[in-house]
Amino acid sequence: MSQLKQRLRADLTSAMKARDELRSSTLRMVLTAVTNAEVAGKQSRELSDEDIVSVLSSEAKKRREAAEAFDGAGREEMAAKERAEATVLADYLPEQLSEQEIADLVGSTITKLGVADDGMRALGKVMGALQPQVKGRADGAVVAAEVRRQLG
């Protein structure tokens, strides 16, 4: 079993003992998502820490989007709950890149690939090179927006 999955299970146990409802429900939800990812496809498999980080990133993104939707609908209490769950998930994700770090990374990748003159046609090439570097550390939409800004 991966170290991250063991940590999630141990933290769930301690959250249950501490009667921390928010943390225990969030960790249960994440462990369920991990289990679903493990049994998805034709053959079940054990997820690596990197795969679990992908699941955590996906769940955190869902929480952010749900909070925005609840805010738009005027349901502040539900939005606050979604944000609190996203905060719990952030404890298990790698530290997020700042906007400046993303801009620097995009600029160096464009220079390294030598596609500055290609304009928007180089978007896919740049994003393909960046994805492994920012996986779990930055939202793909934010990275894509910065790539478009620097290429356009």
Image (cartoon, rainbow, N blue to C red):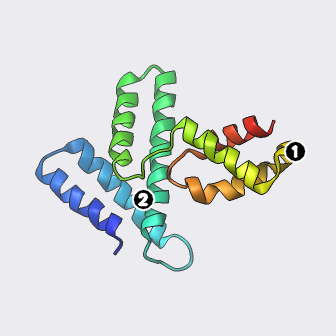
Secondary element at tag 1? helix
Q: Residue at x 51, y 70 (%)?
A: 40
Image-quadrant location for residue 12: bottom left
Q: Residues within 10 Å of mark 2 (few under 14, many from 20)?
A: some
Would you name the residue on which mark 2 appears?
33
Quadrant where the N terminus is found in the figure: bottom left
Does residue 36 appear in the picture of this structure?
no
Q: Residue at x 56, y 42 (%)?
A: 101
Q: Nearer the viewer, residue 86 or 132?
A: 132
- Tell me where residue 125 appears, x and y as whole percent: 77, 56
Identify the amino acid type marked 2: Ala
Q: Nearer the viewer, residue 69 or 9?
A: 9
Quadrant where the C terminus is found in the figure: top right
Q: CA distance from mark 2 to mark 1?
A: 42 Å
Image-quadrant location for residue 60: top left
Pointers 2 and 1 in contact (CB under 8 A)? no
Would you name the residue on which mark 1 appears?
117
In the displayed structure image, the side of residue 118 where residue 112 appears, left or right:
left
Q: Residue at x 68, y 38 (%)?
A: 146
In the displayed structure image, the side of residue 120 where residue 97 appears, left or right:
left
Disc number placed over residue 90 in the picture, else none: none
